[in-house]
Image (tube, helix red, strand yellow):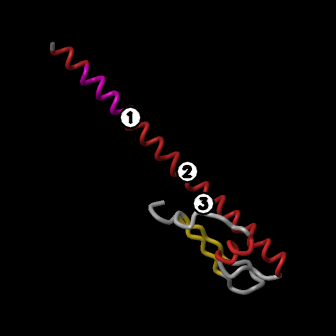
Amino acid sequence: MKPFFRGIAVTLAAFLAMLMLLVFALSQVNTRNEQEQAVALREAVLRATLACYAVEGRYPPDAAYLRTNYGLVYDQERYIVSIRAFADNLLPDIAVLSGQGG
């Protein structure tokens, strides 16, 4: 009877190890996906910023202006978009930060 319990223990340990490996791998994929989404959002903000400059001859003052006038859409609860404009004719500093828990 003892080898039976040993077999169950080994099987259970192997199962738990594989489960932990799977959880770790999924966590890494999720982290990478979030990073790629933030990069894609920054590129979209940059395109909208350049479109604003091409149309109006000045850069936008903030992300709200791009949302209102240039159709920029993103999850505002998940990401914080910072546009720090120094002057109307200088490309502003654009940063995309993860919001809640991201």
Please tell me whether residue 61 is drawn above or below residue 100 in the rendered image.
below
Circle 2: residue type: Arg
- Residue 41 image-quadrant placement: bottom right
Please tell me whether residue 32 is drawn above or below residue 65 in the rendered image.
above
Q: Residue at x 33, y 32 (%)?
A: 16
Query: Residue 5, image x and y in percent?
Result: 20, 19
Residue 10 is a magenta residue: yes
Asked whether 64 or 26 is in front, the reply is 64
Q: Residue at x 42, y 41 (%)?
A: 23
Query: Residue 102, image x and y in percent?
Result: 48, 60
Marks 3/2 in contact by CB < 8 Å: the verdict is no
SS state under label 2: helix
The label on residue 58 is none
Overall secondary structure of the magenta stretch? Answer: helix
Query: Disc 3 designates what residue?
Result: 38
Residue 20 is a magenta residue: no
Please state the extent of the stretch shown in magenta in the rendering: 8-19
Q: Residue at x 29, y 27 (%)?
A: 12
Circle 3: residue type: Ala
The label on residue 32 is 2
Query: Residue 66, image x and y in percent?
Result: 70, 74
Assess disc 1: are there few (<14), some (14-19) or many (≥20) residues with their C-alpha within 10 Å of its C-alpha: few
Please tell me whether residue 82 is drawn above or below residue 8 in the rendered image.
below
Query: Disc 1 designates what residue?
Result: 19
> CA separation, marks 3 and 2?
10 Å
Q: Residue at x 65, y 75 (%)?
A: 63
SS state under label 3: helix
Query: Residue 49, image x and y in percent?
Result: 74, 73
